Each structure stands twice: as structure tokens, then as C-alpha cells.
Image: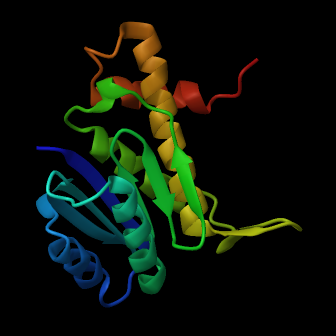
Amino acid sequence: MEKAIITVVGKDTVGIIAGICTYLAENKINILDISQTIVQGYFNMMMIVDISTVDGYFGEVVDELSEVGEKLGVTVLLKDHSTVITDGAYTFKNRSGNAGMASAGMGDVLSGIIGAMLAHNRVSEDISTERFALPFTLYRTATAAYIHGLAGDTVRDEIGEYSLTASDLLKAIPRVLRPQK
């Protein structure tokens, strides 16, 4: 069985669960575990899915779920050996993280970081400069995925990837966020 994690984040609206789950069912992607919640008007759903029955390659799933996410107005994060974060218009690929992070509780830590990023310093809906504007949810979700992976890489460098736990990752987050001297 080949597994992947799908996280969906966005303003709560009718049809998010139906839209994502319909896509998965139509493509014979089985949901092995699912958790969803709404916090201060933001919907967050995390699923562990079996992608061993996917025809073709995982990149097609990423592209198609990007389109579904764009139609639903949500950010979709897909995690296998790397992480893809997309809202359909913009796509980020995060390569931080390591094989030692494939253990119990890691997805929960990622969801917690995403939630904290969405709740922290909410100044505006978009992160804007003169050159571009990124949707707030996409920017914060991509940043959370990077922090998660960087914390995992930090712990791997300290203790090795074979004994890495979610608790170790939690303890590393403050070190990762602290400015380097």
C-alpha cells in the first residue's frame, strides 16, 4: 500500500468535503483515515489516502486536485515523498523533510503548524508586494509545510531519522523559528 496525506484548508463553505471526496472516489483513491474541523471560520481537513491504485503518476493527482481546490476556493496540500501546496493558481513544492517523518503524529504536528500560521498575525487576506499577491491561506500553508520539514531535518541531523518522533519535532520548532546568529 502506498500512502499520501492530503490536507485541505480554506474559508468554510458548503461543498468542500463533497468536492474533494468525489474526486478521490472517482479516481479510486481510498480514504484510510480522515479528520476535519472548523476553527474561526476556517475549514481544515486532513486525510491519509491509499494511492497505490492511481493510474499514471502522482503528479496527475496533484494537478487535478489543484483544479478541484481552485474551484472550491481552498488550498490543497499533498504529502508523499515531497509536499505540494496549491490553490490551483499558484503551486509550491516543498522538499524539506525526510523519511524519518513517516511516523505516527507527524500529520497532526503539520496540521497544528498550519492552524497556528493561519491564526497568527492575520493582517490581510493576501500577502502583497508590488510584484505579486499570494492568497493568505496558500502562503501560510506553504510556510507551515516548510517549517514542518525543516524541523524534521533538524531533528534528523541531531539524532538520526530512524528514531525521530512527533514529540521530537515539536521540540525542534522553536529552534527552527529562532533567528540564527
Judged left or right of residue 95, residue 55 is: left
Residue 64: horizontal and vertical position, in percent? 39, 72
Up the image or down, 72 lies above or below 37; here it is below
Q: What residue is at 84 percent from the left and 65 percent from the top?
A: 129
Residue 54: horizontal and vertical position, in percent? 21, 59
Nearer-the-camera pick, 91 or 162 = 91
Q: What residue is at 33 percent from the left and 44 percent from the top?
A: 80
Q: What residue is at 51 percent from the left and 56 percent from the top?
A: 141
Residue reaching furthest top?
159
Residue 69: horizontal and vertical position, in percent? 42, 76
Up the image or down, 156 lies above or below 169; here it is above
Q: Residue 23: which quarter of the image?
A: bottom left
Judged left or right of residue 100, residue 24 is: left
Residue 27: horizontal and vertical position, in percent? 20, 71
Nearer-the-camera pick, 176 or 5 = 5
Residue reaching furthest front?
56
Q: The C terminus lies in which quarter of the figure?
A: top right
Nearer-the-camera pick, 42 or 74 = 74
Q: What residue is at 15 percent from the left and 74 percent from the top?
A: 25
